[in-house]
Image (tube, rainbow, N blue to C red):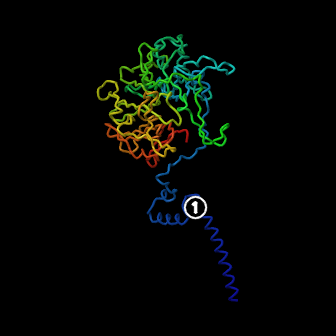
Amino acid sequence: MKKKRLYRWLIVSVVIAILGTLSYVSIKKWALRKFGVSELTIAYELLKQGFSLRSSEETLSPPRAKETAVQQPPLLKNSTIKPFHEIGTHLGRRAKGNNMFQSRGVVIFDANEDNRLDLFFVHSGRPRARATDENSIMQEEKVPAKPCVLYLNQGNAPNGDPVYASVEDLQEKGNMLYVRDELLAENKYIPRTSIQEDEFGPGRIATSAMAADLNGDGLQDLLIGNSHDGIPFQTHDLGLRVYPSKDNVGHHERREILVNRTPSFLWGDMVDGKDVLVHFGDQPEPEGRNTPLINKGDQDQDGIPEWEDVTQEVGFGGKWATIGFTIADIDRDGDLDVYVSNFVDLDFWGFGAKKFAGNQNELYINQLAETGKFYFEERALAYGVAGLHQEGQHPSDVWFPAEQRFKPISVHRREGTVVGEAADHSWAAQFLDWNDDGWLDLIVANDGGNRLRVYENQYGKRFDRVKKFDDPSWDGRWKWRFGWRSVRRNHYKRLWKSSVCG
């Protein structure tokens, strides 16, 4: 009898243990899925809560992610959230680009103070590309020298899409007042004074633009970045190198590099644009000078803003091949300063070239707050951010595997003449307070040596370069654009870049 009872209790104990284990596993999975912690942790926390040692909200909240992790917002499925769709084809012919081998910028801003977002596209006023006929057969003449174009937002269509009209289209129906000032954003060497004048007359070679209130009057002004006339890959040493693979047709040696050159019908004189004065307008001007346009408002109330070119008056221009701007109040005096990222003339830009010059960058310090007068002083060299390779600063050495050593590449001579400058070859820049000291620092992305320059702001008086980023481990490849955001949960700043070529 006693043995039977013992066996019975043993069987019951085993069954209870199995059921308990299964229940424990189920509860553990539920707890981990629901709260991200085990059931024992929940029991412990509830016990502490029972003794008023912790609030219930803190008790059953999921564990915080590590400070180094970026918290991604959850994807919301909501009928009010609609995906993007393409409307660019509705803008018409003026929005289509004509730049070859050039960056092409666009600005989204409220140009005429109607609380609607307008669009500004840059174009090349001296294109190299050839036109084609209706059968796509290439012609002798070049594609039209399109003006830069400002599209003004006319409100929304019944389906909710914004409706845009170019200034040129609006002028045809307008009051014919202030026509020259309203068409100044076309970025022509000789501004048009009538809508009947040739729309495709020569203009500056625009690559980028940015909007900001530069003179402190509350209106969004416009900076247009201009470049040099040039085409890359014209010679063998500057050609586009395609690295070997097993499928190179017609090449028996896999080690043989294929070199592609620009078609000969696009070639031109290889001249360094920084030394060129163009004579299209009333006065000669540097080929790469930029265009600062001050917004004068809508004086005739036709919905089109008027502009004023203040290049000479405010000391802002330059002569290099500009690729972009970044604008901020770096000295905290209440007005906006401008950093200009400059490239090399495209005639001397090549993939895999052994020499890769650049051009110095510019820093324009706004003097409005100090003097009461709107003008700039260029201080990139004085502030240590020009990117010039002087006295061993700003190393740009590149590793040459065949020679097993680093070699400087920024001094480029062709036929005995130095082209470009011994300087960084900059694609993009961004002001941000990366070290959280309250002063905006500067990050510049470069081609050539692929260096990421990080400059720390020293109380608005100068910048000090952070030398740890000179290490080759920080080398990137072709950093095109920057953006940044502050992650509110952990107060860290995240910098993103867009790149090509790996």
Q: Residue at x 64, y 20 (%)?
A: 138
SS for callout 1: helix
Residue 493 sits in quarter:
top left
On the image, the x and y values in percent for residue 266 come to 57, 23
Can you tell which quarter of the image residue 79 is in? top right
Q: Residue 388 lies in what quarter of the image?
A: top left
Location of residue 373 in the rendering, given as x and y in whole percent from the top left corner:
31, 24
Q: Nearer the viewer, residue 45 or 320?
A: 320
From the image, tell me which residue sits under label 1.
31
Percent position of residue 425, x then y? 45, 34
Instruction: Using residue 80 as the reference point, say whether residue 391 is left or right of it.
Output: left
Q: Could you tell me residue 429's position as x and y percent? A: 44, 36
- Which quarter of the rendered picture does the N terminus lie within? bottom right
**Residue at left offset 48%, top offset 46%:** 404
**In this rendering, would 300 be left or right of 267?**
left
Task: Tell me which amino acid carries mark 1.
Answer: Ala
